[in-house]
Image (cartoon, rainbow, N blue to C red):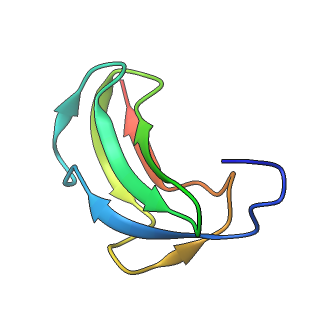
């Protein structure tokens, strides 16, 4: 999102705990002052935990979900 982005707002959670996902599936949509971005799954598996909800303010690089194979 850019090197100067300090935090972003979670504007949409696209998955629920228990959902099966594949690489590239959308997990979250986040928004900064300048851009809206979709966070996609880097691995396939089952969403076992969510660490962010709609309306949360999070810093880039923070763990937002746990996915088990």
In the current view of this chain or complex, which residue is farthest to the front? Answer: 34
Q: Is residue 25 above or below residue 27?
A: above
Q: Residue at x 28, y 29 (%)?
A: 25
Using the rendered view, name the quadrant where residue 54 is placed: bottom left
Picture coordinates of residue 10 (x, y %)? 42, 68
Would residue 36 be found to the left or right of residue 63 on screen?
Answer: left
38 lies left or right of 34? left
Query: Which quarter of the figure has residue 27?
Result: top left
In which quadrant of the rendered image does the C terminus lie? Answer: top left
Count of labels shown?
0
29 to 47, vertically: above or below:
below
Q: Nearer the viewer, residue 33 or 68?
A: 33
35 left or right of 24 in image:
right
Q: Position of residue 4 (x, y in %)?
A: 83, 59
Pick the residue in front: 44 or 7.
7
Q: Left of 16 or right of it: where is 35?
A: right
When the figure is inspected, residue 27 is found, relative to residue 12, above or below; the finding is above
Task: Please name the residue shown 23% across and 51% down the image.
Answer: 14
Query: Residue 11: where, in percent of width, then height?
Result: 34, 68
For the residue pair 18 and 62, the one nearer the viewer reads as 62
Residue drawn at the location 38% of the way across and 33% of the way down = 68
């Amino acid at each position: 999102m850019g090197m100067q982005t300090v935090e972003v707002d979670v504007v949409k959670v696209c998955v629920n705990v228990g959902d099966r996902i594949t690489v590239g599936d959308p997990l979250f949509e986040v928004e900064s002052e300048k851009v809206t971005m979709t966070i996609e799954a880097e691995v396939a598996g089952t969403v076992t935990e969510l660490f962010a909800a709609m309306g949360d303010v999070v810093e880039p690089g923070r763990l937002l979900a746990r996915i088990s194979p």
